[in-house]
Image: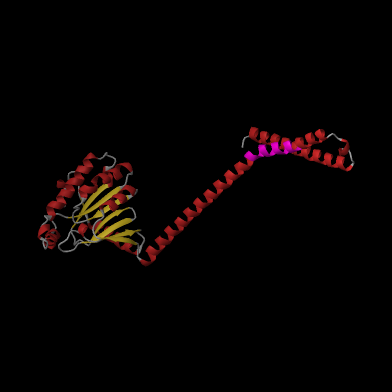
Amino acid sequence: MSRSGSSAGSVRHRIEQGVLCSLAGAGICVSVADILGLVDGMDTRTLSKVTLLILGGVTLFLVVEIHGLKALDDVKDQVTRLDASVNQQLSKLDMDALARELREEHFGGVVRAYPRFPDDRFAEFLDAAREEVTILQTWIPNLDLFQEKLAQALVQREVRLRVLLLKPSSPVADLRYRALARDPALSEDVRANVEHCLATFAALVRRLPESCCPRVEVRVYNSLPSLAVYKADERYLVSSFLHGRLAIHSSQTEIEGRDTAMGRQVQEELNTLWDIGLPVQLPDWRDSPHL
């Protein structure tokens, strides 16, 4: 409160005290006059005027103070609403903390399962990513669905993108082709699909600002695929490579937290494959000696 506001409040307080003292003094004087019998000699009209004067003063004081009383009611209502809001937020925080603790203790970080890859859910992960996006696949069949969101994360939030793909010339590519060929509708050319992904990432790097390019890293691995992993910061979508089915068409497990039991295992697998992976030169990926 400013000094002028404080001074005005003090003056008002003194005026109110003076009015109250005057009213109280008038009441005492009338009472004493009545005891001494002085009121008996007063004209009825005069006595009525004195009474009305006292009542009018009291009424005026109440009218002046009613605004202050209303302000107190408003303050009370605001405090009540604030208290309810704070309690609600604290309750929510407590529930979130409890849910997180239960997930870590009893489910190893597993949040939920999906019958197939949840494109919308991963899009939400990409929108919220602030540090790193990592993808482990043989090739990425659904890359076209979210490559724009990857570009936005790289440019707008400066995330790091790490991608692990199966080496196109690896003998494992033929093994995966045979596993998928159990379903005649999935006679996929694994090598061609991997190369399509590499070309897509090369095109992505070409249109990114130069400052973003070092944060895009693609490696190829020559090993049996273990898990398909789509990771954004602390959230993972994990599936397996089944015979006769693409990984994105298999059931998916959502995991939250790299320090949870499941999160640690998946992260260790990512780190292992990243260490043995061979870097791909982007955007001129065909010049990479490892392909």
Task: Look at the image and tell me whether residue 285 can be seen.
Answer: yes
Whether residue 256 sits left or right of residue 70 in the image: it is: left
Q: Using the rendered view, name the quadrant where residue 272 is placed.
A: bottom left
Q: How is the image coloured?
A: secondary structure
Residue 211, percent from left and from top: 29, 40
Residue 85, percent from left and from top: 49, 51
In magenta, the rendered stretch is: 54-67
Most foreground residue, 13 or 244:
13
Residue 149, percent from left and from top: 27, 45
Query: Residue at position x 21%, y 46% from top?
Result: 201
Residue 24, percent from left and from top: 78, 40
View extreme (front): residue: 44
Q: Is residue 70 magenta?
A: no
Whether residue 29 sits left or right of residue 187 in the image: it is: right
Most foreground residue, 222 or 199:
199
Secondary structure mostly taken by the magenta-highlighted segment of the chain: helix
Whether residue 203 sits left or right of residue 93 in the image: it is: left
Query: Residue at position x 30%, y 48% from top?
Result: 160
Query: Residue at position x 64%, y 34% from top?
Result: 5
Count how many numbered circles sit on residues in the image.
0
Most foreground residue, 180 or 57:
57
* Quadrant of the snapshot with the N terminus: top right
View extreme (right): residue: 36
Task: Look at the image and tell me whether residue 14 can be seen.
Answer: no
Query: Residue at position x 13%, y 54% from top?
Result: 191
Q: Using the rendered view, name the quadrant where residue 210 is placed.
A: top left
